[in-house]
Image (cartoon, rainbow, N blue to C red):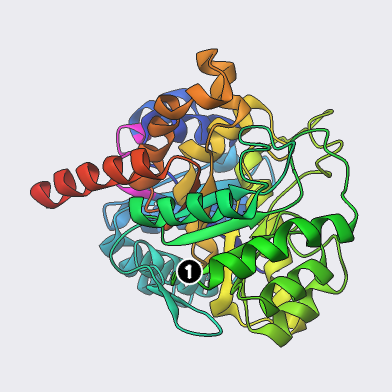
Amino acid sequence: MRYNLRLISAGNRNTLKRHLQAAGVADDGIEIMADKAGVFAIRVDDVSAQAANIIKQQLLSIGGDAAVHKDVISGSPESSTVYLIADKARFFRLRDKLKGQPFRLEELGEEVFRLAALRKAYRQSIPLASGIIDLSKGPIMMGILNLTPDSFSDGGLYTDPSAALDRAEQMVEEGASIIDLGGESSRPGAKELEKETELARVIPVLEKIAKKIDIPISIDTRKASVAEAAVGSGATIINDISGLRHDPGMTDVAIRSGAAIVVMHMQGTPEIMQDDPEYSDTVHEIIDWLDENTKRIISAGVEKEKIIIDPGIGFGKRLNDNLDIIGQAADFHTLGFPVMIGYSRKSFLGMITGRSEQDRVQGGLAVLGRCLAADIQILRMHDIKEGSDFIKVWNAIEKRGA
């Protein structure tokens, strides 16, 4: 059996406490270990009681700690989720402590070393068919340009190609590094659009914009035929809300075109996704889904370096699911891909603030702050000017405190 590991967000005390409570850790142990939230944690699932005890002993011996089910010491339950809590240096030392240990713990030590080394050592660029997306200078913004009459926030505003071009140029001036065009609404309850209609909305605008702006253009579509036509007209990124599962031909288009790919998680389809979404461990389940699907796509021939992942806020998610994704956003770095999050003007912000779509900018800035703290590399948003100002001030504060 291979151990299943992932980094978790331990910087927030309450988030760490929820993790430890779910794992059956004793209450007094939770309080002690939650105070260590300044370090970071690695979650390991389905560890035998014997192996869990060895891990805890070895980590304690070098000044770290391990949270295990309160009854593991007596051998019951037979297995436990284990949370390894330490700083990077101690995780590196743990690899040596686990060498020669039974229960494949030497292999576990190597994987812990890999994850600890990954922390904040994120990819600096994404190759495109022509050029790259530079991530080395901090987070970048993907500007949303909906070419639909019925999108939840800005439907009908940019159906005219000239209006769409004006808005694209405005977003570039305000600081957008990518423009994301979409011709099919993915709001909750939206039905799938015929490809002819989607093509008629997208391609004339795309051709017009591609001649005028020099930043990458993304096509937001689930259809291989639309993606192929868009790439032929100047798009270099395919943003597929289905995670390349809706249309069997999408993976082949991605391979042949050399486009970068956004693989997003969605439970259900836009038409039914908010009917009754359900998770028992939201972030963990989404990470597992993204892991499985990126492996499938890579095995089919898509280059790993071209993949971006998106946990899909609002796509088959309840309010608390969205809050968990935002609060634990750093966990998605475990998979080793650039992470994109799109929170802009979404309904969960309205549930909290009571504001309408156009009046959710201020609430969204709170989400943006958490995303910056989690080192999210790409932020998909409507309000580029406000986001750009927020990021500039955030970066200035961070640089001053470095």
Please state if 370 lies on the left or on the right of 209 as rendered.
Answer: left
- In this rendering, the answer to whether 45 lies above or below 123 is above
Res 97 quadrant in image: bottom left
Estimate the x, y position of residue 232 in percent, counting from the top left.
Answer: 69, 80
Q: Residue at x 59, y 17 (%)?
A: 351
Camera-nearest residue between 118 and 58: 118
Estimate the x, y position of residue 346 in percent, counting from the top left.
Answer: 59, 32
Give the dominant element type of the magenta stretch: helix, strand or loop. Answer: loop
Local crowd size for mark 1, using a 10 Å CA cut-off: few (<14), some (14–19), many (≥20): few
**Circle count:** 1
Camera-nearest residue between 394 and 31: 394
Camera-nearest residue between 217 and 401: 217
Please state if 191 lies on the left or on the right of 9 as rendered.
Answer: right
Question: Is residue 103 in view?
Answer: no
Magenta segment? 33-40
Estimate the x, y position of residue 395 in percent, counting from the top left.
Answer: 21, 49
Q: Would residue 39 be counted in the magenta stretch?
A: yes
Please state if 391 lies on the left or on the right of 400 as rendered.
Answer: right
Label 1: state its secondary structure. loop
Estimate the x, y position of residue 75 in percent, counting from the top left.
Answer: 63, 44
Q: Residue at x 50, y 70 (%)?
A: 216
Q: Residue at x 46, y 33 (%)?
A: 15
**Label 1 is placed on what type of residue?**
Lys
- In this rendering, the answer to whether 218 lies above or below 100 is above
Please state if 87 lies on the left or on the right of 183 as rendered.
Answer: left
Res 347 quadrant in image: top right
Disc 1 target residue: 212
Question: Is residue 172 in view?
Answer: yes
Quadrant in which the N terminus appears: bottom right
Judged from this view, the residue extending furthest toward the left is 400
